[in-house]
Image (cartoon, helix red, strand yellow):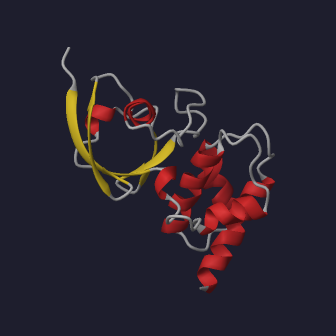
Amino acid sequence: MSKYHVSTTINGDPVEYLCEPEQTLLDVLRDELYMTGSKEGCASGDCGACSVLVDDRLVCSCLALGAEMGGKKIETIEGMADGDELHPLQQKFLEHAALQCGICTPGFLIAAKSLLDRNPDPTEEETRYWLAGNLCRCTGYDKIIRAVLDTAAEMRSK
């Protein structure tokens, strides 16, 4: 079986890679491109740890095929910070201690960014609903929700 040649954009940079037809986007990111920020928690789309944005849509990268990413705009956790300057969500996750083991954190950050890109003033209920596809076994979610809502308030005030 021959490999697919894919040209795409990841975190604003043009990227080309070769992948097997059955390789997931998550496997391509981690194994071919060495972008290990997105985590594999379940391999079935149930936990959200592998969340990325594809053409501004929140996607579980374990469910998307790498071969289908040609011409797409992909955003991963590696592209969230601006050099050494953390994205406001990353900073608030630290301030609110909204992480523990770290497996779910990249997915939560990407999902929260997706929410705030669409809705800069979400309610707590909207935030909980938007993040419902992301599972955490450590924090109990409250600190995560507080961090997202605090980020939204801070970003609106700038």
| Quarter of the image where one finds residue 94 | bottom right
Q: Where's the C terminus, which quadrant?
A: bottom right
| Quarter of the image where one finds residue 34 | top left
Give the residue at x 67% y 65%: 91
Q: Position of residue 152 (x, y in %)?
A: 63, 72
| Quarter of the image where one finds residue 22 | top left
Seen from the viewer's position, the closer of residues 134 and 39 is 39
Left or right: where does residue 64 sit relative to residue 141? left
93 over 60 or under it: above or below: below
Give the residue at x 69% y 42%: 102
Q: Position of residue 134 (x, y in %)?
A: 63, 43
27 over 145 or under it: above or below: above
Residue at the far bottom: name it.
158
Q: Position of residue 143 (x, y in %)?
A: 79, 56
Residue at the far front: name it.
84
Q: Where's the N terminus, which quadrant?
A: top left
Seen from the viewer's position, the closer of residues 131 and 36 is 36
Left or right: where does residue 104 sit relative to residue 32? right
110 over 86 or under it: above or below: above
Give the residue at x 43% y 32%: 63
Q: Position of residue 65 (x, y in %)?
A: 34, 32
- The count of marks equals 0
Give the residue at x 51% y 44%: 51
